[in-house]
Amino acid sequence: MLIGIISDTHDDLPAIRKAVELFNEKKVGYVLHAGDLISPFTLEIFKELRCKFSGIFGNNDGDKLLLKHKSEGHIHNQPHTLTLHGKKIIVMHEPDVINALADSRHFDLIIYGHTHKPDVRKVNNAIIVNPGKAGKLLKGKSTVALVDLNKMAAEIVEL
């Protein structure tokens, strides 16, 4: 199963649209957002995904009640845990406890955002992934991540 990971979209509608197109083109089976969607109107573009979508609140998300409502309950407080394709996954926004989570050996995939810096690494049999920032913001590249849960391999993709 191929999943898409996105974070820190920060209301950048063109970047969100590119990410949704990429995820649909790659036929991902699930998309996870690691926080900082910001405004509820951005969820309209995510509705164009041809797969399931869920995510977490980041530190900059505004109207959390409306975000939760517009996402039909698929945006959660962090940490959010789920199991996909038999793999235990945890999604965080801030990276504060990422290494402790890897040391726990409880999760197969640990996802975070916040730093705007892509990160893919393996620690104690867990893959840690930060997809970077999808939103263009002031400078830098817009990126997302693809994770193959069959191979437990991840890659960063520039939008």
Image: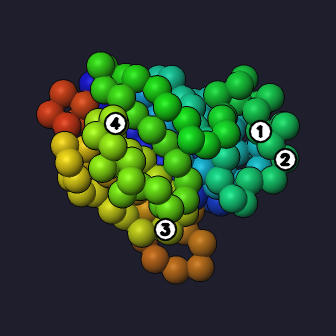
Question: Mark 4 against mark 3, which lies toward the viewer?
Answer: 4
Marked residue nearer the N-terminal end (4 or 3): 4
Q: Is residue 54 left or right of residue 155?
A: right
**Amino acid residing under circle 1:** Leu
Marked residue nearer the N-terminal end (4 or 2): 2
How far apart in space, not on screen, are marks 4 and 1 (Cα)? 27 Å
To which residue does mark 2 refer?
A: 63
Identify the residue shown where x is 20% and y is 48%.
124
**Amino acid residing under circle 2:** Asp
Residues 95 and 60: in front is: 95
Q: Secondary structure at mark 1?
A: helix
To which residue does mark 1 refer?
A: 67
- Residue 92's disc is none
To which residue does mark 3 refer?
A: 116
Image quadrant assignment for residue 41: top right
Identify the residue shown where x is 19% and y is 43%.
125
Q: Secondary structure at mark 4?
A: loop
Residue extending furthest bottom?
139
Image quadrant assignment for residue 109: top left
- Quadrant where the C terminus sits is bottom left
**Amino acid residing under circle 3:** His
To which residue does mark 4 refer?
A: 107
Residues 42 and 147: in front is: 147
Query: Can residue 29 be seen from the camera position used here?
Result: no
How far apart in space, not on screen, are marks 2 and 3 (Cα)? 22 Å
Query: CB of mark 4 within 8 Å of CB of mark 2?
Result: no
Query: CB of mark 2 within 8 Å of CB of mark 3?
Result: no
Q: Secondary structure at mark 3?
A: loop
Query: CB of mark 2 within 8 Å of CB of mark 1?
Result: yes
Residue 123 coordinates in the image, percent (x, y): 22, 53
Query: CB of mark 4 within 8 Å of CB of mark 3?
Result: no
